[in-house]
Amino acid sequence: MVGSDVFSTEIKKTEVLMENFRRAIGLRIKEIKEVYEGEVTELTPEETENPLGGYAKAVSHVVIGLKTVKGNKQLKLDPMIYESLQKEKVQIGDVIYIKASTGAVKRDQTVLPLNSI
């Protein structure tokens, strides 16, 4: 805040002070998100008998193997995430991003083998 702003004839002194107080009180919120990101090495839907009967099978959960910089991780996820994976057309070799809190899936890119370049 500069003195010339306060003593300007265009704006009232109280108005300038109130505006600067509002800026100073500004609230900053930090949010910590749990995400899984990596190259898909395994994508296996585990099926069980349909609870409603009939001949169709239902997906009980999906097993995803992710290769990251820190190492490999195998996740056992909800069938709703499997539907999201199908919507994004995720295949083995794709780099994906999964938000743990919402189950949102985003496909970033496909990793090409070195001999195909």
Image: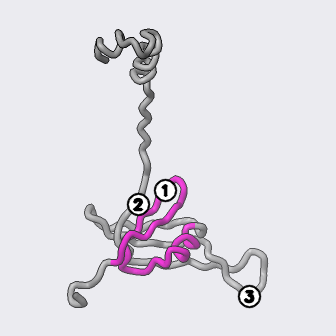
Distance between mark 3 and mark 1 Cα atoms: 32 Å
Q: Earlier in the sequence, mark 2 or mark 1?
A: 2
Callout 2 secondary element:
strand
The verdict on residue 97 being magenta is yes
Residue at x-position 38% and y-position 76%: 94
Neighbour tally class for label 2: few under 14, some 14-19, many 20 plus, Cα within 10 Å: some
Q: Which residue is mark 2?
A: 36
Label 3: which residue?
55
Circle 3 SS class: loop
Q: Amino acid at mark 3?
A: Tyr
Viewer-proximal residue among 102 and 15? 15
Tell me whether circle 2 and circle 1 mark residues in contact (CB < 8 Å): yes
Residue 21 lies, with reference to residue 110, above or below; the image says above
> Going 49% across and 78% down the picture, which residue do you hit?
89
Give residue 28's position: percent from left, percent from top: 42, 32
Magenta residues (range): 81-110
The answer to which quarter of the image holds residue 21 is: top left
Question: Which residue does the numbered mark 1 point to in the structure image?
Answer: 100
At a point 40% along the width and 80% down the height, the residue shown is: 92
- Identity, as a three-letter code, of the amino acid under mark 1: Ala
The amino acid on which the numbered mark 2 sits, given as a three-letter code, is Tyr
